[in-house]
Amino acid sequence: MTPRPLHAVLLPAAAGAQRLLEVLGAALDGTGPALLPVDPRLPAERARALLRALRPATLETLEGTQRLDPGDSPAVAPGTAVVIVTSGSTGEPKGVELSAAALRHSARASLDRIGARPGEAWLSCLPPSHISGLQVFVRSLLSGVPPVVLERLDAESAATTGGGALLARGGGLPEYVSLVPTQVRHLLDEPGGRDALAGFRAILLGGAAVPAGLRAEAAAAGARVITTYGMSETCGGCVYDGEPLDGVSARIGPDGRIRLAGPVLFSAYRGRPDLTAAALEAGWFVTSDVGEVDGSGRLTVRGRADGMINTGGEKVSADEVASVLEDCPGVREAVVVGRPDPEWGELVTAIVVPADPAAPPGLDVLRGFARGRLPDYAAPRAVVVVPAVPLLPSGKPDLRALRLLAQPG
């Protein structure tokens, strides 16, 4: 097999959508180089650092294509069509090499599971430099219709490009969308946002833990929400509402971590055989999450293994506590992290966006609410009130920034 070069594309999502479809299609069918989508919103120095780390042979922008140092750009693993950069929420970003076969299987299984038919369009409002955003483009290629691309999603744009208002008019308009919880939360809070959400035939919701209250609120507004679980290494969501997609298997290892297997798995981390070997275990990808699989094969995700808080000798799932707190009256959004503490080891610390900035819920309120649903040791012992949760470009919470906010003083 002829080695394939790596071609980086740094284009605005909307202005570069047609070109991105072209290079992605060529990457998938083998007529073009492998694709490395780069987020144009990155600061210039960070983008340069990413290019130095992943070493593509060429870089394409709106100004044209330039050749980088070809002698310093190793070929990608055989069969690789796309290299996706992980979000870097907890560590150094990695280049995840995904084969054309894996991406196609993921996209086809997704379309089949939600009942999407050829010719039905997707709304793209997540960065295609992240796997959830890129998969909208892959599904669109398989569906035979280009996505409608928005740089920013709000109630007005959703209602006039994909959602209730335009669906009534027909004509190949977006009927499906992939969102992260923050986007759904914002739409639910905006005038007209609930109608926009209800207009889609299906909403794939993932990228971060989904609070039960958020999903219930969206469903009450008439939205068909399907929660997804996956990561860049699995071509995005590979478990829908707890049930693995066709060909995908889930199991729990002796360390409590979720393992995933199937034709959607990544090939390698670019230039990091050590990390690849550590992540793949006899054909299973070892995730950073803990969970349970019941007798029918249904997966329940409890939270991140590295997001477990050790407080007073007890293990607490930060995601589970945050999910409970988001149901507390007066809380609009909540994230939970561990704050280093000499007595407890770590303090369960809630970072809260209040529903009413003038009347944020106090620690006693949050602790009392949590203790009604969780063990006493899992209730927060500290609270930080913020106007908004800091996010990464992917829409996931920025854990580094959150841990800094949680520090005392």
Image (cartoon, helix red, strand yellow):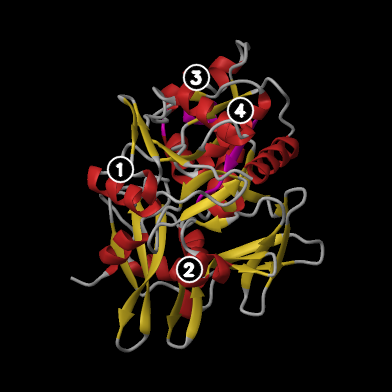
Q: Which mark is residue 406?
A: none
Q: Secondary structure at mark 1?
A: loop
Q: Quadrant of residue 156?
A: top left
Q: Secondary structure at mark 4?
A: helix
Q: Is residue 191 above or below residue 263?
A: above
Identified by mark 1, the residue type is Leu
User: Circle 1 sits on which residue?
Assistant: 42
Closer to us: mark 2 or mark 1? 1
User: Circle 2 sits on which residue?
Assistant: 370
User: Circle 4 sits on which residue?
Assistant: 140
User: Circle 3 sits on which residue?
Assistant: 161
Q: Residue at x 39, y 37 (%)?
A: 58
Query: Could you give the CA–CA distance between mark 4 and mark 3, rounded to whole angstroms?
Result: 16 Å
Closer to us: mark 4 or mark 3? 4
Residue 222 shows in the view: no
In the image, the segment drawn in magenta is: 190-207
Q: Residue at x 31, y 49 (%)?
A: 388
Query: Could you give the CA–CA distance between mark 2 and mark 1, rounded to whole angstroms?
Result: 38 Å
Residue 21 shows in the view: yes
Identified by mark 2, the residue type is Ala
Mark 4 or mark 3, earlier in chain: 4
Identified by mark 4, the residue type is Ser
* Residue 335 in magenta stretch: no
Query: Could you give the CA–CA distance between mark 4 and mark 2, rounded to whole angstroms?
Result: 42 Å
Query: Could you give the CA–CA distance between mark 2 and mark 3, rounded to whole angstroms?
Result: 40 Å
